[in-house]
Amino acid sequence: MLDRSTLLLICLGYAGLLFLVAAWAERRAAEGRLGWIRSPLVYTLSLSVYCTAWTFYGAVGSAARSGLEFATIYLGPSLVFFGWWFLLRKLVRIGQAQRITSIADLLSSRYGKSATLGVVVTLLALIATTPYIALQLQSMTLSLTALTAADPAAPRHVTAFWLALGLALFAILFGTRRVDANERHHGVVAAVALEAVVKLLAVVAVGLFVVFGLPGLDLDALPSPTEAEAIFTPRWITLTFLSATAIICLPRMFQVLVVENADERHLATAAWAFPTYLFLISLFVLPIALAGQAVLPEGANPDLYVLTVPLAEGQTTLALVAFLGGFSAATSMVIVSTIALSTMISNHIAVPIWLRLNRRKTQTSGDVRAVVLSSRRGAMALILTMGYFYFLVSGGGSALASIGLRSFAGIAQVLPALLGGLFWHGATRPGAIAGIVTGFLIWCYTLFLPSFGGGVFMSEAVLQDGLFGLAVLRPTSLFGVAFDDPLVHTVYWSLSLNAAVFVGVSLLLRPSPMEQVQGAAFVDAFAVTPGHLVQGRVATAEDLFALAQRILGVEPAHKLFAAVSRTQGKAGGLPDADEDLIARVERELAGSVGSASAHAMVSQIAQGGQIPVDQLIRMADETAQIVEYSHRLERQSEELERTAAQLRAANTRLRELGAQKDAFLSQVSHELRTPMTSIRSFAEILRDHGDVSSDEAKRFLAIIHGESQRLTRLLDEILDLSVLESGRARLEIRPVRLGDAIASAAGSTEGLRHPEGVRLEIAEPHLDALVMADFDRLAQVIINLISNAVKYGTTEVPVITIRATPLGAGIAVDVIDHGPGILSADRERAFEKFARLDEMTLAGSAGLGLPISREIMRNLGGDLVLMDSGQGAHFRLTLPQAQPVPAVAAS
């Protein structure tokens, strides 16, 4: 056994070595001397961050408990690199082209640079990774306890706290030293590569000792791979699927696989080298598990066999090497995970909030890099704090493998949206959000929250009886379907409903223009080249340069703009602020703050939109879309038919309006020409014939005077109608007693009614009602209706009836005569300008009285309509009733 202080010094020395390696790599990268740092070997070794404490310690524990089930941990990633190499290559190609900084940034960028989707994926990744960080703290505290022979029952929270603090400091030092335009961390990658070598050598050394150094070890007791009935079960398939998903979806794996990739060609080496690494690190898992069962007493923790078997055999140095291997596995995972998650939190939560609160600062002054770095450092502290508290709440008693599988199932919820975004043009942002949220909620309800046990986040009653006491909502048998394994149950329901909701919502909604543009760039990543822009954004080079300086730094911004100037053929100075420059700046900023935040920043100083020509051609090519969008064509066809019907109706109405306009102009010219002809004719007679008698001259002048008055009235009516229709009429609307307006109209028309013998009957009820109206205009309408009734209501006993009745919140006034009336087919035409229903009805009239009257009523807030009646014409005008003035109490 080792002394605790001695082990602490060894850990600090090893951490110092990692620190020196990382600092050396960072210095070489800053000087441009990358060399082996960008080699395929270092890239492949960095992928070993997949092999955490789960695979170093937990794989042996899983083998001891479940036999060959541990192989799924390595089988899934190997299948991805062997069989899905094209998918990895596409991810790397898109990551480099779009300056992707995280898996949240990838999904956000694909779905129209959606800030909301970036937040959703970030929160999901944070919650799903928290158990995994707790797993690393648990493994390190367990190994420290085992190596120092401390009491296993003693509290381990203090040790876990100092470990979390140390890991946070290391991640902050090398993960947030600067804002990189490519978001690459050469020092961290170099340190992770070194740790990959250490943990591989450690597990191989223990394996060799077990196989060749332990006498009497019966290797024939190893399980046979031919026992398929005990191996290839639903759980086996589920674990293989989850481990395959993890290699793509885990934030730390996406970080090293896509973001840290310096050359797409490195994947060709990793395609065989990484599965080889997994094979070597898993080669001795079964022998070590068998040795632990043979050497160690019953009840020993299988998760620590890698460490405790050498200790039991007195191999302290070998145990120390194994401890350093496990320490490397845990620290590399935590460091890379905190870097990846802090980038996501900063780019998709902290920076967007800062932008919303400080819109002007991005355009005026200030260094945005300070905000980015501060938010990332704070996020790292938050991430490790959450992992530490999960460790405390969960008690650290679960098997390492089970904790890791919870995280795998949680982060797998982004898989449907990820694959759909890479291979389906029709995938939409609402579908992706709805699918991820659905799967995430089911994962939380059925696996994550129950992992704390009853009484913490979920009561025992809910665990046993289901939410609200409904058996169909039991976390362990959702919808009444029970599985033998909770993990299989969760993965089945969460991913199936996730995918169904994602596809269903995407089919119901159309992608936005930005989603279509980004969708083409992602789905056709190998076929589409950037096209010209048909609609550019407008910005100044000075604003773009200032923004780039505040995020990238002065020197990188100078290099960027100098390179663009040389491309434009300029010897010096700032380049022209064309769309290529705007897109280049946004792309470079995306490498530092994410695509959504970069798009938001650039949009604040650049206005307009961008649609590539090739994308417009693809969108317009109906033939090419028939196969893929066949399920949408029917709805599009129906919409086109409705639109065509609306266009036909609008076209018909336009023709009617055109005909009405022609008729109106013709009628106006006719109505004007008639009096003008008379005036001209009689004026020429008076001018050219000197023998006109005095009586004839007076008669001719009277005709000229009368026709002039007729012409003036016609012009006044036309102007009055124009003012009323345009809403420019000046009306003095105030409370008016209805009876007073009717009495005024009756008095004005008495001279017209008396010669014709027309009797006017006015009903007394409701004449005291107050209405909101212009008194003179209201009287004008009633006068016009009475005049029309006198002119056209010819009958043996001519009678005109006027009565008022309440109508809702207003008053209706009916003017009824007993004449021939108006046919039903002519009711609307009666209100058209210059309408002639027949020669009798409009003899001697220009046909503007009723149109003017209707416009007056509508300007007063009422209306004038022609009602159905058995005999005669029945006009109804409506007016809003005035509110009574409340009485004031005497003091």
Image (cartoon, helix red, strand yellow):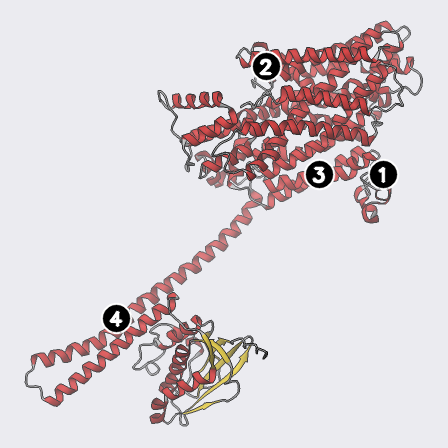
Location of residue 708 with respect to 183 vertically, above or below: below
Query: Marks 1 and 4: which is nearer the front?
Result: 1
Q: Which quadrant would residue 494 be assigned to in this image?
A: top right
Tag 1's secondary structure? loop
Measured from the top left, where is residue 441 in percent x and y?
Answer: 73, 40
CA gap, disc 2 and disc 4: 89 Å
Q: Is residue 757 visible?
A: yes
Q: Are the residues at dot 3 and dot 1 in contact (C-beta closer than 8 Å)?
A: no
* x 48%, y 30%: residue: 547
Badge 3 or badge 4: first in the primary sequence: 3
Residue 669 marker: 4
Relative to 273, does residue 461 appear above or below in the rendering?
A: below
N-terminal label among 3 and 2: 2
Name the kind of residue labelled 1 in the image.
Gly
The residue under the point 61% across, 31% down is 346
Amino acid type assigned to the residue bearing label 4 in the image: Ser
Q: Earlier in the sequence, mark 3 or mark 1?
A: 3
First in sequence: mark 1 or mark 4? 1
